[in-house]
Structure formats: C-alpha cells, structure tokens
Image: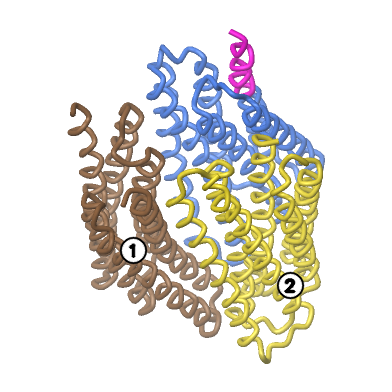
Chain colours: A brown, B yellow, C blue
Amino acid sequence: MKFFPKELKFFDQFELSAQNLLKGAKEFLNLLENYQAQGLNERIETLRVIEHEGDIITHETIEKLNTTFLTPIDREDIHALISKLDDVLDFIESSAVRMQMFKITCPTEQSIKLTVVLYKAVEQVVEAISRLRNIKQPESIIHHCIEINRLENEGDIIQRTAIADLFECCINPIEIIKWKEIYENIETAIDKCEDVANVIEGIVLKNA
Amino acid sequence: MKFFPKELKFFDQFELSAQNLLKGAKEFLNLLENYQAQGLNERIETLRVIEHEGDIITHETIEKLNTTFLTPIDREDIHALISKLDDVLDFIESSAVRMQMFKITCPTEQSIKLTVVLYKAVEQVVEAISRLRNIKQPESIIHHCIEINRLENEGDIIQRTAIADLFECCINPIEIIKWKEIYENIETAIDKCEDVANVIEGIVLKNA
Amino acid sequence: MKFFPKELKFFDQFELSAQNLLKGAKEFLNLLENYQAQGLNERIETLRVIEHEGDIITHETIEKLNTTFLTPIDREDIHALISKLDDVLDFIESSAVRMQMFKITCPTEQSIKLTVVLYKAVEQVVEAISRLRNIKQPESIIHHCIEINRLENEGDIIQRTAIADLFECCINPIEIIKWKEIYENIETAIDKCEDVANVIEGIVLKNA
C-alpha cells in the first residue's frame, strides 16, 4: 500500500497542469476580446508567468515519474499526457507573444472566433482530466474527448477560411505573413488539445 | 493459439492504411497533372473523404492495440507505423487544400515533379508493408526502405531548387508565400514516407 | 559479462555523434562570422558531409540498438538521445542551406548572435554527454543540462527580438520571409539541444 499515495499524485499533477492551462486560455481569450495595444506588455507578461508555471509543473511531474517505481497508469502515457498539456499552453503563449512582436493594433474577428474554439477545447480537456481518476466510468471521459475532436474540426475550418480570406482580401504581404502565423499558432494549440484527447482515450481503453 | 487470428489483423490494418494512402497519392498526382480550377472543390472533397477514411483505419488500429494483450510485433512499433502512415496522407490532403485555399490557377512544373517523387515513395511504402508478414525474408523489405530513402533525397533536392528558383524568379511576395508552403507540404509528405521506412527497418531488425 | 563490451559501445556512439555535431556547429559559426558569398557552395558542401556523417552514426546506433538484447540504459532513451542529437545537426545544416538558397549576401548581426548561443549550447551538450558514463555522479551532468536550458531562453529572446526588428525595420517582404525562416531554423536547432538535455536529465534521474 506504500505506493498508493505516490500514485495518486500523478492525477493531482494532471489537474494542476490542466487548471493552469485553463487560466492561460482564459487570459489569452480575454486579451483578444478586450484588446488594447496599450498595456499589452503587462498582459503578455502575465501569460508568460502562467506558461512558466506550466513548465515547472511539467518538470516536477517528469522528475516524479523518473523516480517512481510503480505508476498507476503506463509511464509513457504519464509522460505523453503531461507533455501534451504543456504544448497547448506553449502555443497559447507563443500566439500572444506574436501579437506583441508583430505590433498588432487590432485582432481580426476570425482570430477571436478561433480563440473561442480553443478556449472551449481547453474547458473539455479540464473536464476529461478531472474524470480520469474514475477510469472505471469511461463513458463520460470519452464523451469529452469526442467533443475535443469536434472542436478541432471546427477550428480547422475557421483557420482555413481565415487564411483563404487573407490571401483573397489582403494586398499587404507583410500583413499576410503576420496573420497567417498567428492563425497557425492558435490552430496548433487546438491540435495539441486533440493530442491530449488521444492520449486520454488510449489510457481509458487500456485501463477500463 | 487463440491470439493468432487477432495478431494477424494488425498486418491487415497496415495494408488497409497503405492501400488507402496509395489511393490518396494517386488522386493528388492526378489533380496536379490534370489541373483545372473548375471542379477543384469536388476533387479536393474526394481527397478529404480518403483522408477521413485513413483517420478511421488509424483510430480502429490504435483501439485494437490498446485492447490487445499479445501483439505480433512491439506495441510501440504498431503505434508508430500506423500513425506515420496516417501522417503521409494528412500532408497530401493538406497540400491539396492549399491549392484551393490559395486559389492556384496552374501548378508549377516543379510541384508536379515533386509529387511524382511522392507518389513513387508511396508505392514503395505499399511494397514494403505488403512484405512485412514475411519478416523472415528481410532483404526484400529493406530493399524498398532503401529506395524510399533515395526518393526522399531526390525530393529534397527538387524542393530546395524549387524554393531557390522561387526567390530568384518571382517578384510577387504573395506568390512566394503560397508556393513555398505548397512545396514544403509535399516535401513533408515525402519525409513522412521516410519515417515509415525507418519504423519498418526497426521492426525488421528486431524480428528477423 | 559478455554483454558488457556491447553496452559500452552506446556511450561511444553518443560521444561520436556529439563530437560530429560540435564540428558542424563550429563550421556553421565560422561560415557566418567570416561570411563570403564566394566559396559559399564549398563550405556548405562541407557541412552537408558532416550532416551525412551524423546520419550514418545515428543509423548505426539504431541498428545496434535493435539487435542488442541488454542495454545499459533504457532502449527508448538511447533511441531518443541519438535521434535528438541528429536533429540539432539537421537544423544547423538546414540553416546553412537557407543562406545559399536565399542568396544571402551578408548575415545579420542577430543571426551571428543567435549562432554563438547555438554553439555554446552544443558545447554544453558535448560536456553533458562525455559525463554520461559516470552516471553515479549526476551533479555535473545536471549542471550542463541547466546551462543548456539557460542558453535556450537566451536564444529565444534574441530570436523574438530579431523577428520583431525585422517587421519593424524591413520594408521588403521577401527579405522578411527569408530572415524569419533563417532565425527560426537556428532557434529550432537550439530547441533541439534542450530536447537532448531533457533526455539526459531523464536518464540521470532513472539511473543515479
């Protein structure tokens, strides 16, 4: 029974990471919805702190993993799950930093639409992760994974339309370069949510 | 002996996936060689259906993997092989979608040349996969893997020349952005064929 | 004891790969610091030979891994470490090739600054790898890993500033496309050094 408390800690770490990710996604959506070039630096600094907090959680989890003999679920799944959660946050921070680097004065409607989808996907990630302890009730976990897949498709369509519009309507190539990269970064963040969902599905299938 | 029929199914899945990939590669090459801006949407829809079919095969295989106790080859190799096969098709579809998104009126000669190499690499992937059941005759499997490596080098040179030419000859930066991305997508599809070959080589070495 | 000599060979391979990587990083830094459009082709050919040598070392190591029954450290760590080392060199070669493809006449100050950081990170990789045999003295190995993390942060800041400056100062979109890609390639090479450090940290934690 000695291993038991140790084992439970991995689920705590997943939840910590997912909650921190949700905080980052909320901050980024808020940044876009109430965008002001002024004060941008401080708000991006806030996101950077959240991203750094995510790095620490990830690093601690991997350290714990490498020094724990018995794990409640497969070692490679623990590693994949905590890394993919971290990837989502990295791409959120990277999207925000690009707003600053590219001196964006006003976010496009489509970038906000895409970020709403990202935020919803992160909410589903939090839901799925919080149910991972009850692995013997797999239906509700899988339900959230399917929802993440649906949101990823939705995001994909928005991103492709946004980029097509960019080439259709924008005559300034420098603007095209900037927005194309921002759209791609947000879309990649959503993709990484789908990676999280895939790891969770694998864990459920193996353990249910 | 109970596990035997189950085990064989993984090879069926690999072949299904490879055949579906070949269908996609043929469709894409045909799209470029007989390019017409009219009717493009329908043909890209066809490719999207093939890509979706690939997703289903991949998903089924991973589900089967997660619920199978004994596998004929290492679990991580099954996962890697089916995922990498899927990646090739994803980048083929993504290349085709970009033709549409960017409203390309006429493919460049070099994009066709690169796609011919991609198609040949996919043919070699099909050959190697179909021989994987006879793992005790490794020479012919390895022969196709080496051919994929050769084709990847050939593709790399075409892509680098095509991009250098783009910057040399094209004065419209928007055209450069579009074609650079299309070339990179096709080249990445070929790279993913090489990833498939590397996984196959590993399987052969471990089991021969 | 029969397995012992075999096992040691993996550390030899890591050192071979790291030394070859250092040679490539030195060659690339030298290329930038003493840049001449004339003679560029020959110098890039030298880098290509080094990169190819890296491919051979990697391929040999994976072959050895697939045919060795007992390994001194986890199989997946051997695979990850040799692959990540190879990735660093790939991105160095790819950065150099882009100088040629884009017909760069003069490297920017920031590209040299970024490459100095890359070179320092590679030096730290060599140091960490050379201490991997003495895994029971983990402090000095970890010390070099932390230094690589610090250099990656330093590189990240330089790259972000360089790209922001590019959009701020450069009015030619084609120049922006070129330099943005070169900066991203060099930065990715540094990122891959951090991946190497993460694998090494994992190995140390598991085995110390």
Q: Which label was assigned to residue B112?
A: none
Asked if badge 2 and badge 1 are on a common chain, one would say no
Looking at the picture, does residue B136 appear above or below residue B171? above
Is residue A21 found left or right of C173 in the rendered image?
left
Residue C116: percent from left, percent from top: 55, 34
Is B29 placed above or below A20 here? Answer: below
Whether residue A43 can be seen here: no
Chain name for mark 1: A
In the image shown, does B143 or B45 lie closer to the viewer?
B143
Residue under the image location 41 percent in, 12 percent down: C137
The numbered mark 2 sits on a residue in which chain? B
The image quadrant that residue A79 belongs to is top left
Q: Residue at x 66, y 23 (%)?
A: C16
Q: Which sits in the foreground, C125 or C76?
A: C76
Which amino acid is tagged 2?
A: Lys
Q: Which residue is mark 1?
A: A145
Magenta stretch prevailing secondary structure: helix
Q: Is residue C202 left or right of residue C126?
A: left
> What's drawn in magenta, residue-wise?
C1-15
Q: Position of residue C141 (x, y in %)?
A: 44, 20
Query: Residue at horizontal 66%, vertical 90%?
Result: B39
Give percent across and percent down for residue B141: 76, 46
Q: How many marks?
A: 2
> Which amino acid, mark 1?
Cys
Indicate the quadrant containing the C terminus of chain C: top left, top right, bottom left or bottom right.
top left
Q: Position of residue B41 (x, y in %)?
A: 61, 86
**Nearer to us in this view, C122 or C168:** C122
* Residue under label 2: B26
Residue B127, quarter of picture: bottom right
Disc 1 on helix, strand or loop?
A: helix
Tell me if residue A193 comes above or below residue C72 in the rendering: below
B119 above or below C47?
below
